[in-house]
Amino acid sequence: MVEPFGKWFGKLKDVKAMAAIVRRLRKIEREGYFGDHAPIKGADDLYELRIFVGPGYRVYYGLDGDRIVVILGGSDKGRQADAIA
């Protein structure tokens, strides 16, 4: 995994959250299905995957055209504002 997402993901201690995040990313890769996601208010062309495990994890991304997903980073819900900034 590539920085900064890989750095964040590598520090996670919540095994259930890690598995849920990997499952979601694989589903996007294989099926193009994003599941629960939303645009980030105030951040043009940025979105978040919402993963409701533990404290509620977020994976931030942007799209390059309609095929490539660029993973920008992640956080739990409590640290969302800092991660987006």
Image (tube, rainbow, N blue to C red):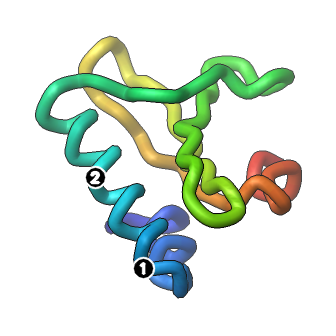
Residue sitting at x 52%, y 79%: 14
Residue closest to the far left: 30
What residue is pinned by disc 1? Answer: 15
From the viewer's perspective, is residue 37 above or below residue 53?
above
Q: Which of 42 and 35 is in front in this view?
A: 35
Residue 85: percent from left, percent from top: 83, 49
Left or right of 27? Residue 30 is left
Left or right of 36? Residue 38 is right
What residue is pinned by disc 2? Answer: 23
Q: Is mark 1 on a helix, strand or loop?
A: helix
Left or right of 41? Residue 5 is left
From the viewer's perspective, is residue 29 above or below residue 44?
below
Q: How crowded is mark 2: few (under 14 residues within 10 Å), some or many (20 or more)?
A: few
Residue 3: percent from left, percent from top: 47, 67
Residue sitting at x 43%, y 24%: 63
- Which residue type carries mark 2? Arg
Earlier sequence position, callout 2 versus callout 1: 1
Left or right of 70? Residue 57 is right
Q: Which of 83 and 53 is in front in this view?
A: 53
From the viewer's perspective, is residue 71 above or below residue 35?
below
Q: Which of 2 and 75 is in front in this view?
A: 75
- Which residue type carries mark 1? Val
